[in-house]
Amino acid sequence: MCTHPALDPRPPMSAVVIALNEARRIEPCLKALKATGIEELIVVDGGSSDATVEIAKRYADQVIISDKGGVARDRQKGIDAASYDLVAMIDADHRVGGDTLDSLWRDMQDFGFDVVQAGVRMTGDGFWVQSENAAMEVFHHIPGPRTMIGTAPALYKKSLFDHIRFEDNDPEVSDDADFSYRLMRLKRFRFGIGRTVVAQEHFPDLQAYIKKFRWYGRDDAGFCTKHPGRAWSMVYHLFVRYPIVRPLRALLKGKPLAIPYFWMASVFRISGFVPALCERLLARAPLQKAEA
């Protein structure tokens, strides 16, 4: 869903899709991207054991087989392979519309961004899908500059990767938090949320959400050990902003359906975060002792 009027022709773009065992969802994603007239379509596969690669080869201009180095490393591989100065980062569960790339380009121009993330709207009518969509209205679908954005769906100026790259050493460091934080510290690039909204196909059952948020929690722990100066900010995010601040904001905005999503996200991110952080701190203790 996009709100812009007719646009001038956009510059040529590359689209990068990273995937791991996405045979159930990747074909509609790639079909939708091809229908936009995208000039280059690159798929980076992180070591799938299903038919993801075979499906990707039907649509992509390049299919890169990665060495299971992690999400952030795979994103960087796709960007490095891109031929054009604008790179759209799209995940396998995103469903772009015919004007999505044009709209992201206009968002980038309108806001003067070097990276612009789209909003997302989950498809389906299950309870957790509806709760997540309500949550997005509370905290995400607010166009303008941010200090933290997600890595996809988003449009990047490839030139900024001459100055910063996605984390490629530790696969369990949150790719979006780490990238946004380091990009912010450079103080030379602008980024944020645009007006464009992209459909997203989540597996709607609670178990899928629990698995996702525990994975996010482990990545949050990786972020904290890499950037210890930001650890308290992450703790506040998980223990205060998610369970308290955002539910209160949801009530003020008349979106009470968002509250279960915020509470569920907090509980299961924390359940992944705490043991992963303990593991990392215990693993680092002998190294610190030896250095001392």
Image (tube, rainbow, N blue to C red):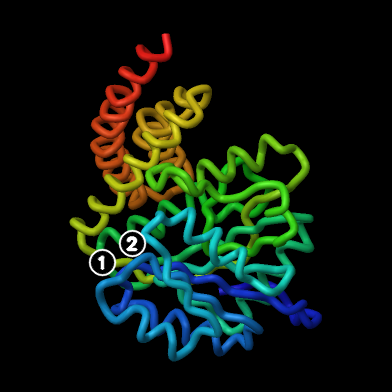
The quarter of the picture where residue 55 lies is: bottom left
Q: Is residue 121 left or right of residue 127?
A: right
Please state the total of marks drawn on the protein image.
2
Please, what secondary structure does the residue beneath circle 2 have?
helix
- Residue at 58%, 74% (x, y): give it: 15
The quarter of the picture where residue 187 lies is: top right
Residue 142 percent location from the top left of the image: 59, 52
Please, what secondary structure does the residue beneath circle 1 have?
loop
Residue identified by numbered label 2: 130
| Alpha carbon separation for disc pair 1 and 2 | 6 Å
Residue 155 percent location from the top left of the image: 64, 64
For residue 11, above or below residue 217: below
Question: Which quadrant does the N terminus fall into?
Answer: bottom right
Q: Amino acid at mark 1?
A: Gly
Q: Is residue 275 left or right of residue 47?
A: left
Is disc 2 surrounded by few (<14), some (14 to 19) or many (20+) residues within 10 Å? some
Name the one closer to the observer, 74 or 15: 74
Residue 148 percent location from the top left of the image: 57, 43
Badges 1 and 2: C-beta atoms under 8 Å apart?
yes
- Residue at 30%, 47% (x, y): give it: 215
Q: Amino acid at mark 2?
A: Gln
Q: Is residue 272 visible?
A: yes
For residue 11, above or below residue 70: below
Residue identified by numbered label 1: 126
Question: Which quadrant does the C terminus fall into?
Answer: top left
Name the one closer to the observer, 12 or 251: 12
